[in-house]
Image (cartoon, grey):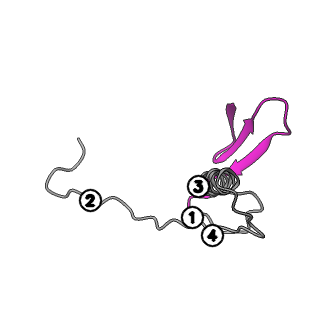
Amino acid sequence: CRTVAEGRFRLTNHIRDLAPITLDEAGGLPGPDPTPQPLDLLLAALGSCLASTIRAQAAARGIALSALALDVEADLATAPSDEAHPPS
């Protein structure tokens, strides 16, 4: 996998011989953004990993799944500021 920074926040990811995946870390900038943010891709990867593991385990145990859908979310918190020790 190769990630190339393009412009202020746009990133293009090259994975094997697949089509490039463009991400954009908007950083709270206003305006519509048609590209996913890196966290979106991370959550999608986690959901895909979990779903494939669940399907493999179900198949190994002879359990037929008629459907499987996972909703993966993240709550982000900013790090607390350390006013007692400001950066130097």
Image disc number at residue 81: 2
User: In what element is the residue under mark 2?
Assistant: loop
Q: Position of residue 51 (x, y in %)?
A: 66, 57
First to last magenta residue range = 1-27
Q: Quadrant of the C terminus?
A: top left
Name the residue that disc number 4 marks: 71
Judge whether residue 3 is colored magenta: yes
Residue that extends furthest to the left in the rendered view of this protein: 84
**Relative to residue 27, is residue 79 drawn left or right?**
left
Q: Amino acid at mark 1?
A: Gly
Q: Work out how far the residue at label 4 is from the one at label 3, CA to CA, in angstroms.
A: 14 Å
Badge nearest the viewer, 2 or 3: 3
User: In what element is the residue under mark 4?
Assistant: loop
User: In what element is the residue under mark 3?
Assistant: helix
The answer to which of marks 4 and 3 sits earlier in the sequence is: 3
Residue drawn at x 71%, y 67% as measured from the top left: 68
